[in-house]
Image (cartoon, rainbow, N blue to C red):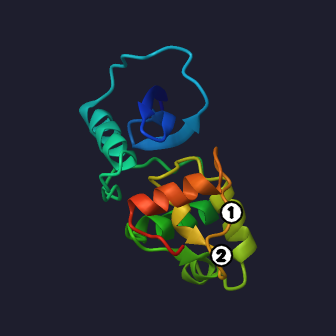
Amino acid sequence: MALRSLTFATALGRMRLAWTAEGICALRFVERLDREEAPRAPAWVMEAVRRLMAHLAGQAQDLRDIPLDLADLTTFQRQVAGVLRATAPGQTISYGEVALLVGRPGAARAVGQAVKANPILILVPCHRVVAADGPGGWSAFGTPERKAQLLAIETVTDG
């Protein structure tokens, strides 16, 4: 399975996206671009990039239909990713609620670890997971302010 990637600039920072024939397998904020790339990416990847750029520029998109390749995730991580992908833009869900939905009541900490290991930011919307008493932290590149920015794009203001 060939892995290809490209790096692109968005309104919230630079991102690196990787894909296989099955779908996107990684999406991360990166600190810098070593060089601008003009990749030969399939049309579906370039459409995903266009929609991500629009989303991060404040034009909220429902990105749940973009194909993903979750083969490198554990079964539990795939279950958590499935719950997060089913959480609509503008909605949030608590770690405990995710644990219940994957059939592991009381496994909120394990959900937190799965969220922390999420390799596909925004498309597996870990920013929508909140603590029972508020927004909670941010484990990806950036800060809790980045989480607030992503939620604000989706019109979630109270976490």
Q: Residues within 10 Å of mark 2 (few under 14, many from 20)?
A: some
The residue tagged 2 is 131
- Position of residue 3 in the picture relative to residue 88 (left or right): right
The residue tagged 1 is 137
Image coordinates of residue 55 in percent, x first then y, are 35, 49
First-in-chain label (1 vs 2) = 2
- Alpha carbon separation for disc pair 1 and 2: 8 Å
Front position in the image: 56 or 79:
56
Q: Amino acid at mark 2?
A: Ala
Front position in the image: 127 or 116:
127
Dot 2 falls on a residue whose secondary structure is loop
Q: Residues within 10 Å of mark 1 (few under 14, many from 20)?
A: some
Image coordinates of residue 101 in percent, x first then y, are 54, 81
Above or below for 112 versus 144: below
Residue at the image point whose x is 42% and y is 49% from the top: 68
Residue at the image point whose x is 33% and y is 19% from the top: 40
- Position of residue 131 in the picture relative to residue 79 (left or right): right
Q: Quadrant of the C terminus?
A: bottom right
Residue at the image point whose x is 52% and y is 50% from the top: 121
